[in-house]
Amino acid sequence: MTHVLHRSIAHHYPTAASGAGIVIRDAAGKDYIDASGGAAVSCLGHSHPDIIQAMRAQLDQLEYAHTSFFTTQVAEELADDLTAHAPPGLGHVFYVSGGSEAIEAALKLARQYFVEIGQPQRRHLIARRQSYHGITLGALAIGGRALPRKAFAPLLIETHHVSPVYDYRERRTGETPEAYGERLARELDDKVNELGGDTVIAFIAETVVGATLGAAPPVPDYFKRVREICDRHGILLILDEVMCGMGRTGTLHACEQDGVSPDLMAIAKGLGGGYAPIGALLLQDKIFKALADGSGAFQHSHTYTGHPLACAAALAVQRVIRRDNLLANVREQGARLSRRLQERFGNHPFVGDVRGRGLFQGIEIVADRGTKEPFDPARKVHARIKQEAMARGLMVYPMGGTVDGTRGDHVLLAPPFIIDAAAVDTIVERLGEAVDAAASA
Ligand SMILES: Cc1ncc(COP(=O)(O)O)c(C=O)c1O
């Protein structure tokens, strides 16, 4: 009998006992290849000696100092490191303990910015359908999936949603990717105009949509057009790179590949690689300046903001990624993973699409390739795939509701950046068996 309120009360979870490299071993001695980094977290795999060493060294010095009394050297060094490698203008960092907290901070900072600069009438937030931004009330409110919002609807702030970039299902026959992106940009512009351009605070989007769409990348120029629209209306662009950022797509920030720099960027997961709970919000200099010239403080903080142990872990993770040139490996093994997935699933009767960037790849499961009809949600194909994969010693991150929040299934892959070619091949082989078993059951 467990006293833990687990994610699913009826489910029996194996006990994770140890980890090494890309493998987690359970208490019964069974090994699992971590092909999803948990939920796109473990970018350096498990038990990396250099990260553990850096964390030990920090513990030997100082475990904690409250940020209302002190700063710490490690928090300063990490902020120097993050801003030195950030997209242009993102010159300051606000620390939190995870993705949802980063999003909450982004929403509040965006609102406070406009209060500081004398535009308190700005009150609307625009996000996209089928997005996931976290589970706390603000993050849930901007999240674009109807089902998880339903029970909490009376508690949620008002938000507005436009279409995501969902090339596989929502780009029209004969429409080029560029024309599709333009159509989506116009939809955003129309929404802004409908609400009144000077009443909108921010547009928020995942650069590459992770958990809810299964590694769906933007089409060319989409974010450039979004950036133009935001600038024209004086709206802040918030990019949620909690899952797709910090190297996962082959560049440190996913938006580098789209040629845009956001006003606020949320990062987490791969920032600390699972070695400690840490997230961060990167902010443009103009936002910092508005606070500095205005009230002088962001009206937001947590007890564990800038925790020294978490900062030490994140700093070590980022240094190892650079020292070992791991982004090159993300690009190389990402290309191999994409190729192998195409080979295995390109003509699979139950896989409609293979997509992604770098080591952030997804497959969309369908009942019929021709019509793109999804499986009946009652069959819970995604859950079966997870079960079949675990039985074969493979961790992947499947999710249901891909199409509209209720129908559809996909599988997300996000293996550690240290992965090699042989492991990529094994992952695809085991995933193939798991999909075959689950879809035909
Ligand atoms: C894009 C995105 N934003 C925010 C979050 C929330 O992060 P956390 O679970 O650390 O609160 C997630 C988590 O999966 C995410 O994928």
Image (cartoon, rainbow, N blue to C red):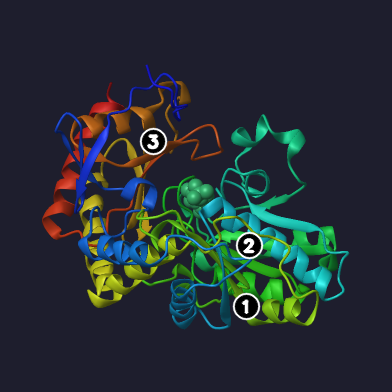
Where does label 3 land, which residue? 366
Q: Nearer the viewer, residue 106 or 314?
A: 314
Q: Secondary structure at mark 3?
A: loop
Quick check: marks 2 and 3 in contact, CB under 8 Å? no
Judged from this view, the residue extending furthest toward the left is: 422
Q: Nearer the viewer, residue 156 or 338?
A: 156
Residue 365 position by quadrant: top left
Marker disc for residue 284: 1
Return the disc, 2 or 3, that comes first in the chain's sequence: 2
Q: Which residue sits at x=71%, y=67%?
A: 298
Q: Position of residue 398 (x, y in %)?
A: 38, 39
Q: Amino acid at mark 2?
A: Arg
Left or right: residue 229 versus residue 388 is right
Where does label 2 land, which residue? 183
- 192 vs 80: above or below: above
Q: Secondary structure at mark 2?
A: helix
Q: Which residue sits at x=68%, y=78%?
A: 288
Alpha carbon of mark 2 to alpha carbon of mark 3: how far?
26 Å
Q: Quadrant of the C terminus?
A: top left
